[in-house]
Image: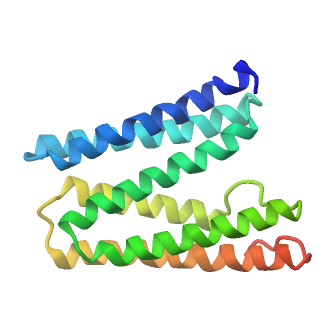
Amino acid sequence: MKFRQLFSIPNLLCYFRILLIPFFAYSYLHAQTSADYLGTALILAVMECSDFLDGFIARRFHMMTELGKIIDPIADKLLQLTLLLLIVIRHPFASLVLILFLIKEASMAVCGLVSIKRKCRLDGALWCGKVSTTVFYVCMVLLILFPGIDSVWANILLCVTAGFLLYSFIIYMKTYYHMLRKDGPKHF
């Protein structure tokens, strides 16, 4: 792999995002005051801005690399997994969202590998995946910013997150099903 591809600006932003995950986790686990939780939410916001920027820069300036296509979703999933593991500490109901997330991501990884083996793959995320990810981060930020939130409201946010995750999972599985049946991808 060429140095230029390995260290392209979008890939550097992905590396930066991955490196921030332990700092984010440490910040969340040691937060005690409202200012601490705000700082934690700001770290998350920086990570999400870097996610947006790396995709924008890669597409806009034709800097997409095969490595970037691999590490960007890995960085996203590592962050989402970390968030759910941290949220479970204060909100046990989040364990159900975590299980759904793990099933969804494992299924999508298997389908993705099978589709690559068959020389067909999805190019980029489907709209439902983008919406689901946005809802996920909005709900997680709210749970971080309001650590003392009533469990009823926390569970509502987690149910909304789970609902969008489930919907996205169903749409992706339908899309992979049609794609792997040789019908070609059908975007729902």
Q: In this view, does 12 lie to the left or right of 134?
A: right
Considering every residue shown, the one lying at the far left of the view is 33
Name above or below for residue 26 compared with residue 73. above
Q: Is residue 150 left or right of residue 141?
A: left
Q: Nearer the viewer, residue 45 or 110?
A: 110
Q: Position of residue 9 (x, y in %)?
A: 61, 25
Residue drawn at the location 69% of the way across and 34% of the way down? 58
Q: Where is residue 43 in the image (x, y as percent from the top left)?
A: 32, 38
Q: In this view, does 59 lie to the left or right of 16?
A: right
Name above or below for residue 98 compared with residue 53. below
What is the quadrant of the N terminus in the image?
top right
Q: Where is residue 12 in the image (x, y as percent from the top left)?
A: 56, 27
What is the quadrant of the C terminus in the image?
bottom right
Q: Nearer the viewer, residue 177 or 40?
A: 177
Q: Position of residue 36 (x, y in %)?
A: 15, 41
Q: How many numbered marks are there?
A: 0
Name above or below for residue 113 compared with residue 154. above
Q: Nearer the viewer, residue 100 or 141?
A: 100
Residue drawn at the location 39% of the way across and 70% of the way down? 98
Residue drawn at the location 21% of the way across and 53% of the way down? 145
Residue drawn at the location 31% of the way across and 54% of the way down? 141
Hey, which quadrant is residue 67 in on the image? top right
Colour scheme in use:
rainbow
Q: Is residue 57 left or right of residue 187?
A: left
Considering every residue shown, the one lying at the far right of the view is 182
